[in-house]
């Protein structure tokens, strides 16, 4: 029964070691396959891009998605390998614990049996030798199992360290790609803002130029309208009045002396006096005025001035002798 237990423990240890080695080898092959597949996919993408570079632009979002899928695949593969390695490590440790427990039980039973035999004087020498060989073999098996366990543990730690390094490298690459993408987006945003700012400045400049042109056109239009209005007013005045001048005739003097006396009184009041000889006497007039209304206002002022005593003044349209 003890030999059978030892044999089963050895089989469990051997089977666990073989299974763990096979899984680790399979994990290496899968990781190697994923690493080889990523450059092949990248090469295929580069070839496709090279053939379409003349007519198409690079689809950055597609590249990002492919890289993200590759990263997730690698991470998933690494996680699965780590989980399987941890599972088989636990199985190995459990098998080693069971084997150690069984060896301890056998060793205790052997000691008990040896004590019983030592109490008797009839212990055959060949049995003593068999027990020594048995203990030596058990110790050697235990030592071999311990060394194997240590070797497997070291290999497991090495694989875990390698997987962790690969995972860290993949993470660093992902972070570098994310940083590069963030910088590209920041540059694109800065260029967009600069373009918008430039467009706004150009639009404002164009608006200011348009307003200045509109203001200049409005000023020119106003001047043209004012000029046109002045010309129309001048034409209307010329049409209505011609060369006529509106005068206020104050008196008709019989001689030059009387005419000078009346003119002196008017000039003393600030009026502009004009004398014109006629067949009936010398005409004394104030003016000329620019229109009949202004001449009529002057007439009323003269008629109402008691100091002048010229209540018979009236308005006439008079044309100078040189323009008759």
Image (cartoon, rainbow, N blue to C red):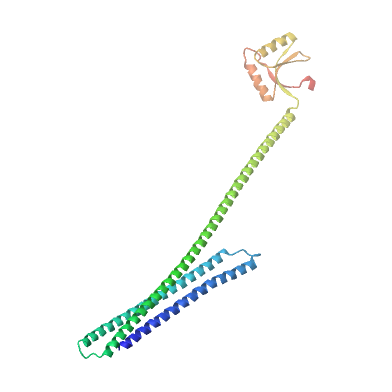
Name above or below for residue 180 compared with residue 81. Answer: above
State left or right for residue 292 relative to residue 156. right
Looking at the image, which is closer to me, 248 or 63?
63
Q: Position of residue 243 (x, y in %)?
A: 76, 25
The furthest residue to the front: 125
Name above or below for residue 60 compared with residue 186. Answer: below
Looking at the image, which is closer to me, 264 or 9?
9
Q: Position of residue 167 (x, y in %)?
A: 46, 67
Name above or below for residue 270 compared with residue 2. Answer: above
Q: Quadrant of residue 252?
A: top right
The furthest residue to the top: 257
Residue in the image at 32% along x and 80% along y: 100
Would you say residue 255 is visible in this rendering? no
Looking at the image, which is closer to me, 222 or 121?
121
Label total for image = 0
Query: Can you say which quadrant of the picture contains the C terminus?
Result: top right
Q: Position of residue 257 (x, y in %)?
A: 73, 8
Residue in the image at 53% along x and 57% along y: 183
Would you say residue 301 is visible in this rendering? yes
Looking at the image, which is closer to me, 188 or 226?
188
Q: Position of residue 301 (x, y in %)?
A: 63, 18
State left or right for residue 296 relative to residue 132. right
Residue in the image at 41% along x and 75% along y: 85
Name above or below for residue 187 compared with residue 245. Answer: below
Query: Can you say which quadrant of the picture contains the N terminus?
Result: bottom left
Residue in the image at 70% along x and 35% along y: 228
Q: Quadrant of residue 149?
A: bottom left
């Amino acid at each position: 029964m003890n030999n059978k237990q030892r044999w089963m423990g050895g089989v469990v240890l051997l089977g666990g070691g073989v299974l763990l080695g096979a899984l680790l080898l399979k994990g290496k092959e899968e990781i190697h396959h994923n690493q080889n597949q990523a450059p092949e996919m990248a090469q295929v993408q580069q070839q496709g891009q090279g053939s379409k570079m003349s007519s198409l632009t690079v689809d950055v979002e597609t590249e990002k998605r492919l890289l993200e899928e590759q990263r997730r695949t690698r991470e998933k593969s690494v996680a699965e390998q780590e989980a399987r390695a941890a599972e088989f490590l636990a199985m190995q440790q459990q098998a080693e614990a069971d084997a150690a427990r069984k060896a301890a039980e056998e060793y205790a039973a052997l000691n008990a049996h040896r004590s019983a035999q030592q109490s008797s004087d009839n212990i055959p020498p060949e049995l003593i030798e068999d027990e020594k060989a048995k203990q030596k073999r058990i110790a050697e098996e235990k030592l071999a199992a311990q060394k194997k366990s240590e070797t497997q543990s070291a290999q497991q730690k090495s694989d875990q360290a390698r997987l962790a390094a690969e995972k860290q490298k993949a993470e660093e690459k992902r972070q570098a790609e994310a940083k590069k993408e963030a910088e590209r987006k920041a540059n694109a945003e800065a260029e967009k803002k600069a373009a918008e700012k430039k467009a706004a400045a150009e639009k404002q400049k164009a608006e200011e130029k348009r307003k200045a042109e509109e203001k200049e056109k409005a000023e020119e239009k106003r001047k043209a309208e004012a000029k046109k209005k002045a010309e129309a007013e001048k034409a209307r005045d010329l049409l209505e009045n011609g060369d006529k001048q509106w005068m206020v005739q104050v008196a008709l003097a019989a001689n030059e002396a009387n005419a000078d006396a009346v003119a002196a009184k008017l000039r003393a009041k600030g009026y502009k006096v004009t004398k014109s000889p006629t067949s009936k006497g010398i005409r004394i007039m104030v003016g000329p005025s620019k229109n009949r209304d202004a001449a009529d206002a002057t007439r009323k002022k003269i008629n109402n001035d008691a100091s002048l005593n010229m209540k018979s003044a009236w308005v006439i349209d008079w044309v100078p002798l040189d323009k008759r």
